[in-house]
Image: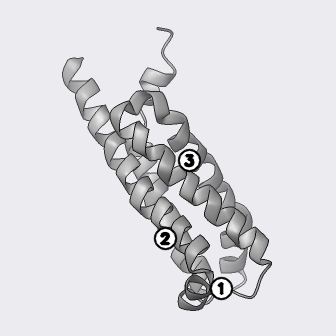
Amino acid sequence: MEDNARIEKGRLRAMYLYTLFGAGGFGFAMLAFPGFVQSILQFPVQDPIVFKLYGSVLLASGLAALPALRSPLKFVPLLLIQLIYKPAWLAVAAIPLFLKGQFPLYVVVISVVFLTYIVGDLYAVPFAYLFSKK
């Protein structure tokens, strides 16, 4: 059991690092350089408040991953939130566009990134531990 716990913590730490640099870094870029992010990914013109709101959420996720590196099991809810909202976004935003034959660059990029998080979270989250009666 000790080896399994260590492996799970290593997987969790890997996802927290990915969240720190991926989500946190992108969130920071959305807040500090919104025009650059919008132009590089060809985002359509949108309400800057909403764009920065999502950037703030991403930055917060990244920063929450910092203490998670030290106590990985205590911060599993961070990964569970990702594991819920990313597939939900794919189901209600990306897939309907793809089924219409529309493939905007920003939707494709976000979809690919979200899929990497989903696969990583499914691999890292210790569901047996979370749902055990102990």
Q: Which kind of residue does numbered mark 1 sit on?
A: Phe
Is residue 98 placed above or below 81 in the rendered structure? below
Alpha carbon separation for disc pair 1 and 3? 24 Å
Q: How far from the left and from the top, in percent, is residue 127? A: 46, 29
Q: Tell me what residue is drawn at x 52 percent, y 63 percent.
A: 114
- Specify the label residue 112 is tagged with: 2
1 or 3: tag closer to the N-terminus: 1
Q: Residues within 10 Å of mark 2 (few under 14, many from 20)?
A: few
Percent x, y of residue 72: 38, 33
Look at mark 1 in the image and give the residue it sits on. Answer: 43
Q: Are marks 2 and 3 in contact (CB under 8 Å)?
A: no
Mark found first going from the N terminus, 2 or 3: 3
**Is 58 on the left or on the right of 21, as rendered?**
right
Look at the image and tell me whether residue 3 can be seen: yes
The residue type indicated by label 3 comes to Leu
Q: Secondary structure at mark 2?
A: helix
**49 vs 17: above or below:** below
Residue at the spot of label 3: 83
Q: CA distance from mark 2 to mark 3?
A: 14 Å
Mark 3 neighbour density, 10 Å: few (under 14) some (14–19) many (20 or more) = many
The residue shown at (66%, 71%) is: 94
Residue 90 shows up from this direction:
no
How far across and down, in percent of the image, does residue 77 sit?
55, 35
State the residue lying farthest toward the left.
3
Q: Residue at x 52, y 77 (%)?
A: 109
